[in-house]
Image: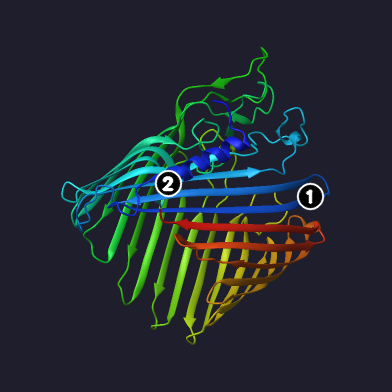
Amino acid sequence: MKRLGLRGHFAVCGGLWLVCEAFPNPASTAETRVDADFTAQFYDVVSPYRDPVVRRRRYTHTLGLDASDLDGDRGYLAPELSLRARMRLDADLGQTSSERDPEQLARYVPGLEEAPVDLMYAYLEGRHYLGGILGFRLGRQYQMDSLGFWSFDGALLRLDAPRIVGVEIYGGFEQRGGLPMLATSRYAADGVFRGDRGDLESNQWPSYLEQTELAPAYGISLQSLALGWLRGRLSYRKVINQDRVLVSPLPDAEGELRFVDDARTSTERAGLSLMLAPVELGNLSSDLVYDVYLRRISDARASIDWYATEHSTLGAGYEYYLPTFDGDSIFNWFVQGASQSVELRGSTLLTERLDVAARAGLRLYQADPEDDVQSGDGRLTDQVLSMNGGYRLPQARIALSAENQWGETGRRLGGSLSGNRSFEDGYYDALAVLSLYDFSDALRPQRDAISFAYVLGGGVSPGVATVLDSRLGLEWEHAMSRLYGHRFRVLMTLQVVLLP
């Protein structure tokens, strides 16, 4: 499939806009909503070594359609059919040709496109069929559960035994970059670099893996519906790799490289989440993820919050995190060190206008035995203390935050002060942010620095006939540090919501 040029991408988005405009008019029974946003960013990033300089002129445009009650029946438990879709154009006109030229080894970036378009989601959803028992989704969709934020193309079927249990069964193909499906690699597992190798020779960038085959995926989840205050969800998902992959970085004795092209596991995980939420007392929640491929727990979290008063909450939390990767990643051959953190937190509304919150915690990192900086038990320990507060006025808000993280890995001390104000009943708005941080890295003391940054911005929100929640904004950002000198960024945003 030939890649679309920038004009072609704008034509695709423009065509979807026209389709949205032509969708059922206000006289129909369906409820429709069309929204679009446009963001332009202009910035230069200078390497601490002064070269290379990365120049970016990014234009990001999204266009969404939400149409509900397509079947016209609006009863409370009546079958409901909806259509939801969103596209994104993420163009970067600041790229140089050398960044897309495989012969320019110093600047080439595999898979880099000047104006990629991806279909974020597009699915037909049905609910409350067969007396409220059956629901489904068809198309590109997201899954959000203890296993993470994930996207696939396929079908999902949900069956509910009223007030007892809900079952979701889904299958299809993981959304991956490099395939001619208006897709992106944002939702694939970490640790690999995949895409279209059509412009590369076999001996160029062997670490950039070919993505030509679909990646089958399937999963199932069970959700409790009959336990009152207790809610639970058990999830399982597996993704399979099918592309040919190089497994020997160096030729063998006969000068041949070894490849594997059999179907194999990409990721396989199971997760459990529980929440106990008495309405007046607080809530207790936990998540556990088991990586079946690694045969290890990769994520474990527990949190408790107590509603001490009507305006105050006290809480505590624990988190264990172990990095995991795609089955084809070379990182699976190395030792993965886990991190653990515990924290105490609290927040309160002191007055109708003033709120404050604080957090104190401890973080433990599993140290590499080869590191020079490590404690006697092979772990690195950091302490964390943060505070923030906000003060609200009728048309303004001022916020102050401060953080101090110190210990064996280094130090990060600083904070920010921000304020925003609206004028003429929200027709105009203004924003100002100041931040100051002191960084110290125990492994790279030569990179210690102090960073200062400020942001100034404003916007206008005109109301035009059928246009709702529209806003045009402009921001200027300036950051400075001895490591990179001065960095500048200009950000322009435009949001529009239409009712056809």
The residue carrying mark 2 is 20
* Label 1 Cα crowd, 10 Å radius (few <14 / some 14-19 / many 20+): few
User: Percent position (x, y) of residue 308?
Assistant: 39, 81
Instruction: Label 2: state its secondary structure.
Output: helix
Mark 1 or mark 2, earlier in chain: 2
User: Percent position (x, y) of residue 488?
Assistant: 75, 58
Q: Is residue 222 above or below residue 100?
A: below
Seen in the image, is 362 located left or right of residue 291?
A: right
Name the residue at the bottom extreme. 351
**Residue at point 67% right, 66% down?**
407
**490 or 14, nearer to the observer:** 14
Name the residue at the left extreme. 131
User: Percent position (x, y) of residue 369?
Assistant: 66, 49
Q: Amino acid at mark 1?
A: Ser
**Residue at point 30% right, 72% down?**
278
Q: Are marks 1 and 2 in contact (CB under 8 Å)?
A: no
**266 or 10, nearer to the observer:** 10
**Residue at point 47% right, 38% down?**
175
**251 or 114, nearer to the observer:** 114
Q: Amino acid at mark 2?
A: Cys
* Res. 420 in view: yes
* Label 2 Cα crowd, 10 Å radius (few <14 / some 14-19 / many 20+): many
Q: Which mark is residue 47?
A: 1
Image quadrant in which the N terminus is located: top right
Q: How many marks?
A: 2
Seen in the image, is 70 located left or right of residue 110?
A: left
User: Percent position (x, y) of residue 487?
Assistant: 77, 58
